[in-house]
């Protein structure tokens, strides 16, 4: 995870017709990053390749959402998620991510592929407060394990309260 960076509070955006693409190995190390990703993250290809994708993780991103994401892709399933990332400069940017396992000709997972697009502001009006609640739960817990469990339970509750059986369905309902 990105640590020690000064957060600027400046939000970067990209065009609705632009798609951020990255590919990683099974450990989440970046193998490919397209030009849109390079531009918005502020990193060069040389700085990114071989590095953990978590290097762009914003500290306001709930651990519960990342756990859900990793649980799903490691199980061979796709996942849709709203993610706030941290650029090299300390700016941040939001994405609607679609992450899928990349498999070989025999169906064996070899890595992950992620396409991200700019989320609608209306979606973020729902997601930002939810993620703030989840992060507060994680921060105020007695220990990280307890915080993650409580935050994950709250995420499940909020998704159900919104009338959805899964986080993916909830996200897609907001992705208009």
Image (cartoon, rainbow, N blue to C red):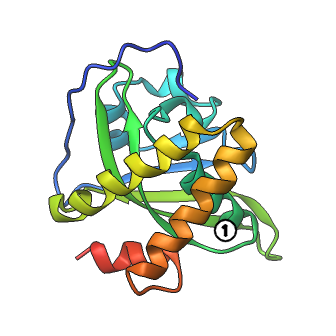
The answer to which quarter of the image holds residue 53 is top right
Residue at 36%, 28% in the rendered image: 87
127 lies above or below 43: below
Residue in the foreground of this view, choosing between 115 and 4 = 4
Residue in the foreground of this view, choosing between 41 and 6 = 6
Image quadrant holding the C terminus, namely: bottom left
Image quadrant holding the N terminus, namely: top right
Is residue 174 shown left or right of residue 31?
left
* Residue 29 shows in this picture: yes
Residue in the foreground of this view, choosing between 57 and 63 = 63
The answer to which quarter of the image holds residue 104 is bottom right
Is residue 170 shown left or right of residue 150?
left
- The x, y position of residue 59, in whole percent, is 47, 32
Query: How many residues crowd mark 1 within 10 Å: few (<14), some (14–19), many (20+)?
Result: some
Residue at 24%, 26% in the rendered image: 9
* Residue 119 shows in this picture: no
Residue at 65%, 30% in the rendered image: 50
Query: Mark 1 highlights which residue?
Result: 72
- The x, y position of residue 11, in whole percent, is 21, 34
- The x, y position of residue 108, in whole percent, is 82, 69
């Amino acid at each position: 995870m990105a640590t020690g960076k000064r957060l600027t509070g400046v939000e970067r955006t990209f065009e609705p017709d632009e798609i951020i693409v990255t590919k990683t190995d099974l450990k989440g190390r970046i193998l490919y990053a397209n030009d849109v990703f390079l531009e918005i993250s502020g990193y060069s290809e040389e700085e990114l390749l071989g590095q953990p994708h978590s290097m762009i993780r914003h500290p306001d991103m709930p651990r519960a959402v990342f756990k859900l994401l990793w649980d799903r892709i490691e199980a061979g399933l796709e996942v849709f998620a709203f993610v706030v990332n941290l650029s090299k400069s300390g700016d941040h940017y939001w994405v609607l991510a679609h992450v899928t396992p990349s498999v070989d000709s025999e169906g064996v997972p070899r890595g992950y592929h992620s396409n991200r697009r700019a989320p609608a502001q209306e979606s973020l009006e729902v997601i930002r407060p939810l993620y703030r609640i989840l992060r507060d739960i994680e921060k105020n817990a007695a220990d990280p394990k307890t915080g993650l469990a409580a935050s994950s339970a709250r995420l499940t509750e909020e998704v159900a309260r919104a009338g959805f059986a899964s986080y993916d369905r909830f996200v897609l309902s907001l992705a208009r």
